[in-house]
Amino acid sequence: MRFQFVPPLCLGLLIGAVACAEEPAAIESESVRSTATTESDLPLDALRTFADVFGRIKEDYVEEIDDKSLIENAIRGMLSGLDPHSSYVDGEEYRDLQVGTSGEFGGLGIEVGMEDGFVKVIAPIDDTPAQRAGLQAGDMIIRIDDKPVKGLSLNEAVQLMRGKPGTEIRLSILRGTDDKPFEVVLERAVIQVASVKSRTLEPGFGYVRLTHFQAHTTDDMLKAIDELKQANAGRLKGLVLDLRNNPGGVLNGAVGVSDAFLTDGLIVYTEGRVKNSQMRFKAGPDDVLDGAPIVVLVNAGSASASEIVAGALQDHRRAIVMGTQTFGKGSVQTIVPIDEHSALKLTTARYYTPSGRSIQAHGIAPDIALERGEFKPLADPGLGSLKEADLVRHLDEQAPATDEPTEPEPLPLAVEDFQLSEALNVLKGLNILGTVATP
């Protein structure tokens, strides 16, 4: 049998799709497989035990079950016992896997993993039912409708959360140190993910948010930066790269985004047991910002590909990383097609930052720790002082002679997004000092 290996890919599981790399396939020959088999003896006693259990289930289980179902269940169990990210996918799951990089899929718009028997939210995706319902990174889903999650595999829980767009689902959520769970009702939808969003924060200072790493994310980001330059006299004084709640995606997307800001050196490398899983990615000579300072915003929902970008820019002292500790997803999954309808999603390598740091279970520590906060200006900063309006027989305000409606004042950036406001302040400071970000 020949197995087709598609180089590294995704990080985590999306409700509705898993993003995977679109890379030329490398074929592992039969001779390689047979050589690997002869190098280690088969565990004959364990195989006999497996056969005995298989036969006992066939004969004594309360309901008749066919051989195909038993074997598939055995495969699923074998993979689920390895790590939270390895799994067997077939049918609709496999079709979702194949189209995961298209940026459109059905579901809730949430990336999840498994922890302590419950489904853990890695990150909600922007402009999706999960994000609009207020789900946060770290939330634990303990019930799906009326069914407890405890005892379910991740794939089983995902199947329960999937459904026809327009149908409702009720999730019971446990958050942080709260004693009691709360319920949220979401309406399933066709998720269309715009992986890149951008705007000018202040003249000369740009903002780019990456919501997910897809096959076209690098090109979309370069286009957004070019538009920001054109809107700011042809150059940017600094850029905030927002990777908060970005659950990852295509590895090549992370490499391309990092390469856009680096002029040389290693971006990321992977190490695994087989030769195909050992790769090194290096930067080209061009920096799209010509050395202008960068602040990268991260949080606990920044995972996998996001951590590759943050780690690479941090190690090369190309950016200051601000926010909170990232998720710590530092393993690479490879899709191994079995036939036209099924495949293995198998963890084949760990990835490392240019300096050799492993992200797995550690994450990226920010250079400047900045917790999520809320900024509220005082309702009346002059409370207690005497004003014109307090004087006896003061003149009343005269309304302007115009019928045009007045535009409401936009909220200060610090009120809209405190972390983003602080990132902009750091960029301004770096620009005044005339230095590249070197924490």
Image (tube, rainbow, N blue to C red):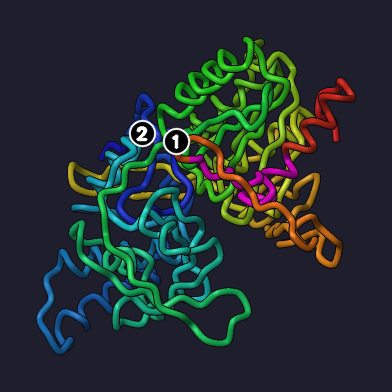
Contact (Cβ within 8 Å) of mark 1 with mark 2: no
Q: Residue 319 at x, y = what percent?
A: 74, 32
Image quadrant containing the N terminus = top left
Q: Which residues are magenta?
A: 406-423
Verify whether residue 417 appears in magenta.
Answer: yes
- Depth check: give the residue in front, 227 or 182: 227
**Rendered position, 162 above or below 259:** below
**Image position, residue 97 (x, y; %):** 30, 45
User: At 41% across and 80% down in the image, what residue appears?
Assistant: 150
Q: Is residue 263 visible?
A: yes
- Residue 196 lies within the magenta run: no
Question: Which disc number belongs to residue 350?
Answer: none
Residue at 24% of width from left, 75% of height from top?
A: 54
Relative side of 190 to 67, left or right: right
> Looking at the image, which is closer to me, 45 or 276?
276
| Residue 404, label in figure | 1
Q: Quadrant of residue 352?
A: top right
Mark 1 and mark 2: Cα distance apart in space? 79 Å
Please tell me which residue is depicted at 35% across the width and 36% down the height of the picture: 101
- Write down the residue under mark 2: 31
